Every structure is written in C-alpha cells, then in structure tokens.
Image (cartoon, rainbow, N blue to C red):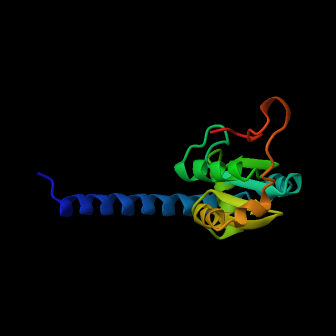
Amino acid sequence: MITRLTSARFASTFVNAIKEQNASYTKKALKCYEESKEEVDRKLDPVFNSSPLVLFMEGTVDAPKGQLSLNVVKMLTEVQAAPLVTVDVTEHPAIAGYTVAKSGSETTPHLYYNGNFYGDHDRVLSKYKNGDLRKIGTNKRSEGAFAGELPIGMY
C-alpha cells in the first residue's frame, strides 16, 4: 500500500526532475541563441513591429503544446487581445533562448506588449485576475452572422 509520505516523495522527486530538465534546456537554448544571436535578432526583432501583442509560446494558438501556453491563449481570447502574433519556441532552441534573454524569465509562454515584456504565465494570470489584462484587449464582440460571439478563437 502506498502511503501519503511515499506519494509526496514521488511527487517531489518528479517536480524536481522537471525543474532540472527545464533549467538544462534553458541553458542550452541560451547557448544556442548566443551562438547565432545576430541572425536570430535579425529575424525576430521585426516581429515586434508587426503587432503590439507578441506571444512566444509552445505550439500555436490552434494547437498549444503546453498547458501554460493554452491558458494564456484562453485569457487573451477572452479579453479579445488582437491583433496577436505568436512565435513557437519549440521550432528551434535559439527562439526559446531569444525570448528568455529578452524577458529574463525562464518559463514560457512570454507575452510582449508594444515591444516590452508584459509577463510570463503567472504574471499574465495575475493581470487577468485583477482586470489589468482587459486593458490590452478590445473586449468587443462580433457583429453580423455571429453577433455576440467572440470573434477570435472559440474554446
């Protein structure tokens, strides 16, 4: 019979292993970014000029690859934060390294507003809960055939 103490130890070991794995990946991603910094900057810096909202996330808006990314997409959808440009950090480690270096936060997703780091998942969630996230959204519902529906992403 598994005791609570055994379960707690297992969970603790698992959480620590995930933290170590994330730290290791972040270190590799930063190294990869530094090795190709000029090229990565040249390709990603213009992304901030294309939209006031840029989300570096795992996966895409239609198919997030992580729970934290999915949660941020849901929050941005609810407040109608558009136009939104997303960048998949899983496409190449240098992309993850770029946003980690730019934001100073090791855990993605990273949301940028007007070129400045707005927050990672926990900060965005906090701003969502206290109502600040609504300030970057339109909160406008669609008109016409789908009147009253959210015009972007229905989850």
List x then y, in percent, for residue 53. 79, 56
Q: Indicate the quadrant containing the C terminus: top left, top right, bottom left or bottom right.
A: top right
Seen from the viewer's position, the closer of residues 95 and 66 is: 66
The residue at 73%/67% (across/down) is 117
The residue at 76%/55% (across/down) is 54
Seen from the viewer's position, the closer of residues 89 and 152 is: 152
List x then y, in percent, for residue 41. 80, 58
Extreme top residue here?
145
- Is residue 69 among what the camera can see? yes
Snapshot quadrant of residue 133:
bottom right
List x then y, in percent, for residue 73. 65, 49
Measured along the vertical axis of the image, is residue 6 above or below residue 67? below
The residue at 84%/55% (across/down) is 42
In the picture provided, is 86 more to the left or to the right than 11?
right
In the picture provided, is 4 more to the left or to the right than 137?
left
The residue at 66%/37% (across/down) is 62
Extreme bottom residue here?
104
- Is residue 89 among what the camera can see? no
Snapshot quadrant of residue 59:
top right
Extreme right residue here?
49
List x then y, in percent, for residue 71. 58, 51
